[in-house]
Structures are given as C-alpha cells and as structure tokens.
Image: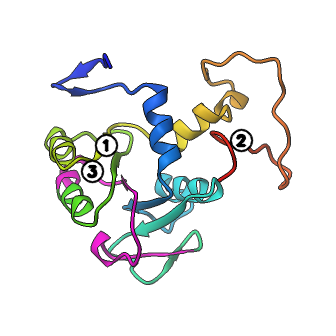
C-alpha cells in the first residue's frame, strides 16, 4: 500500500480498502446523530439503514428516543449489542474520547466524518487493532462505489453504457455487491 501521507497518517484510501470496510461491517453506531432530518447525521443514518446496515444513533441529549426509527443510546457503553463500526459525527476534539469508547466496546472500525481528523485518536485505534478512516463519509463512499453517485454527474471513475435499473421502491437502488 502506498497511500499519500499527511502528518504521518494515511490521507487517501483505496477503493478496495473502503469497500472491504463497508462490506465487513453490519452494525454502525453513529455518534452525534441528530433527530433533525435536515442534519447530515440524520440523512447519513437513514441512508445506511436503507442499505441494510443496523444503525444505532448515539446522542446523550436524546437517549431513549428514536432517530429515523432507531432507538437512541446516550453513549457507546449503553448499546445492547455488538458494534462493528463507530461513525464519528462530532468535532475532532471529541474523536479521541469516542475512540477510547469504541475500543472499550470492541468495535472493529473507527470512521471519522468529513472534516474530522485526529492523529492521536487514529494512532490509538490502530494500536488496538482497529481500522481507521478519517475525513470521509460512509454514505458518499457507498454511493460512489455502488455507482449511485454517478447518476448525479459526480465522477465515479466507472465508465458504463448500462443504465441503472429501478428498484422495488420505485427509485434506483444499487449495492456494493451481493444482497446482504
């Protein structure tokens, strides 16, 4: 692997790396999930749910309520089932503490959203054997790798003359691979 480096930590990720992460996780805790449909954490959560992931919203101010139809937990420690990936929708200042919690609950991946980078948190997670993605969005990556983003004119790096099919819900549905 020859990633571009920034401050000693990986800045870019190969499509293979991202696809392997998205294919291997099933349960995603979204720390900083918002109940407001206009917030990115809300529509990312809803999108990932639609793709078959078990999304667990985490927000101390909304514990016990629902976000996008899923029960909200106040902290990672309170989640009642194993978590594969922790998606951090908080500022970089909070990433280290959330990473410590992710390690404590046995998560396999720490994913920091767009604009979130914390070298110390990444080093801590990697030292504990977790995979780390920084400054990326799993919704965007899923859409790009599945070809959905190409429908809106964004460069997906895939050339095809095939038109996407229509899903059972009346909208176009793409996946990363075989059905889950």
Q: Is residue 73 magenta?
A: yes
Residue depicted at 27% across the width and 50% down the height: 91
Q: Quadrant of the N terminus?
A: top left
- Which quadrant holds residue 72? bottom left
Q: Residues within 10 Å of mark 1 (few under 14, many from 20)?
A: some
Position of residue 88 measured from the top left corner of the image (x, y, whole percent): 34, 53
- Up the image or down, 117 lies above or below 51; here it is above
Q: Earlier in the sequence, mark 2 or mark 3?
A: 3
Q: In the rendered view, tell whether residue 76 sits above or below residue 71.
A: above
Mark 1 — residue?
131
Asked whether the beta carbons under mark 1 and mark 3 sit within 8 Å of each other, the answer is no
Q: Is residue 82 magenta?
A: yes
Q: Nearer the viewer, residue 174 or 60?
A: 174
Mark 3 surroundings: few (<14), some (14-19) or many (≥20) residues within 10 A? some
Vertical relation: 44 (above or below) 116: below
Which residue lies under the disc numbered 3?
A: 91
Residue name at image x 16 percent, y 44 percent: 127
Between tags 2 and 1, which lies in front? 1
> Circles 2 and 3: CB distance less than 8 Å?
no
Q: Earlier in the sequence, mark 2 or mark 1?
A: 1
Q: Disc 2 to disc 1, how far (Cα)?
A: 25 Å
Query: Alpha carbon of mark 1 to alpha carbon of mark 3: how far?
Result: 19 Å
| Range covered by the magenta-colored residues | 70-96
SS assignment at label 3: loop
How far, Cα to Cα, is label 2 from label 3?
31 Å
Quadrant in which residue 83 is drawn: bottom left
Colouring of the image: rainbow
Which comes before the other along the chain, label 1 or label 3? 3
Res 174 label: 2
């Amino acid at each position: 692997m020859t990633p571009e480096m920034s401050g000693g930590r990986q800045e870019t990720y190969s499509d293979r790396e991202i696809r392997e992460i998205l294919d291997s996780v099933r349960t995603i805790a979204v720390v900083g999930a918002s109940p407001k449909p206009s917030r990115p954490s809300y529509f990312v959560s809803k999108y990932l749910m639609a793709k078959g992931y078990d999304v667990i919203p985490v927000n101390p101010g909304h514990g016990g309520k629902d976000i996008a139809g899923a029960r909200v937990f106040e902290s990672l420690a309170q989640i009642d089932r194993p978590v594969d990936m922790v998606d951090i929708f908080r500022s970089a200042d909070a990433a280290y503490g959330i990473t410590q919690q992710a390690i404590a609950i046995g998560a396999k991946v720490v994913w920091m959203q767009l604009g979130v980078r914390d070298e110390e948190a990444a080093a801590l997670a990697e030292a504990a054997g977790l995979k780390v993605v920084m400054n990326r969005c799993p919704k965007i990556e899923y859409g790009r790798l599945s070809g959905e983003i190409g429908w809106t004119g964004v460069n997906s790096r895939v050339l095809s003359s095939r038109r996407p099919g229509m899903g059972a819900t009346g909208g176009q549905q793409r996946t990363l691979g075989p059905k889950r």
